[in-house]
Image: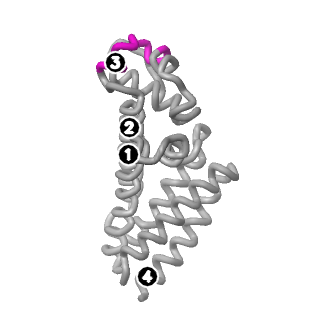
């Protein structure tokens, strides 16, 4: 999200916009609170009155990031309504779209957790987001007729994660297409079984 700084946004929205942009681009602990506050154009007290701490701002940033990502996936798989196999593969199409964006910096959860201590707000928010990814793969696997949808979901999550890391580390958006091809083989094998 880009910071508008406009007065039509609440202090909470301006802080989240600024945090989202800065944290995703540079890191949740690399970016200090003073930079977030300056970019948001709010008083320091606004941050603490709204979020209580930087850790809670990090949590809110990750929750918002997950909600945007979830909407993106849901919108993408809705294009293949009624075809669970194509919906499963559509998740990888959503990854591809993300990987080709100039501001792509990898998974916000992975990035934030790499900077944070175990049990921190980042890890707690990531757990929720990752559970959702597993659940969407499981639900769609069941709908597609996979013999062991939880097992298929576990395989697809590894593929999803691997593609995301490859796209970031190798700066290769084609990782999504490669992952999609492997996912198609896994899905077809799970349905045939």
Q: Which residue is mark 1?
A: 125
The prevailing secondary structure element of the residues shown in magenta is: helix
Quadrant the C terminus occupies: bottom left
> Circle 4 sits in a helix, a strand or a loop, which is it?
helix
Q: Which mark is residue 11?
A: 3
Q: Are marks 1 and 3 in contact (CB under 8 Å)?
A: no
Residue depicted at x 68% and y 49%: 171
- Placement of 38 over or under 110, stated as above or below: above
Q: Quadrant of residue 104?
A: top right
Residue 100's x, y, as percent? 60, 47
In the visual, does 95 lie left or right of 149?
right
Q: Nearer the viewer, residue 172 or 61?
A: 61
Secondary structure category for the residue under label 3: helix
Q: Is residue 75 above or below residue 43?
A: below
Disc number lying in front (1 or 3):
1
The stretch of residues the image draws in magenta is 38-49
Q: Secondary structure at mark 1?
A: helix
Mark 2 / mark 1, whichever is N-terminal: 2
Residue 190's tag is 4
């Amino acid at each position: 999200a880009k910071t508008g700084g406009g007065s039509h946004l609440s202090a909470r929205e301006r802080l989240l916009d600024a945090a989202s942009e800065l944290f995703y681009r540079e890191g949740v602990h690399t970016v200090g609170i003073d930079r977030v506050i300056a970019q948001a154009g709010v008083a320091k007290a606004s941050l603490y009155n709204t979020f209580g701490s930087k850790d809670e701002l990090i949590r809110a940033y990750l929750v918002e990031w997950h909600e945007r990502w979830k909407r993106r996936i849901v919108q993408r798989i809705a294009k293949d309504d009624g075809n669970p196999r194509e919906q499963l593969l559509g998740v990888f199409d959503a990854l591809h779209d993300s990987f080709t964006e100039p501001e792509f910096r990898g998974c916000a959860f992975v990035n934030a957790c790499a900077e944070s201590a175990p049990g921190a707000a980042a890890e707690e928010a990531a757990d929720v987001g990752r559970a959702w990814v597993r659940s969407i793969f499981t639900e769609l696997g069941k709908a597609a007729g996979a013999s062991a949808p939880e097992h298929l979901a576990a395989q697809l999550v590894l593929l999803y994660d691997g593609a995301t890391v490859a796209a970031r580390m190798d700066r290769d958006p084609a990782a999504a297409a490669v992952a999609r091809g492997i996912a198609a083989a896994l899905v077809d094998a799970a349905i045939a079984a």
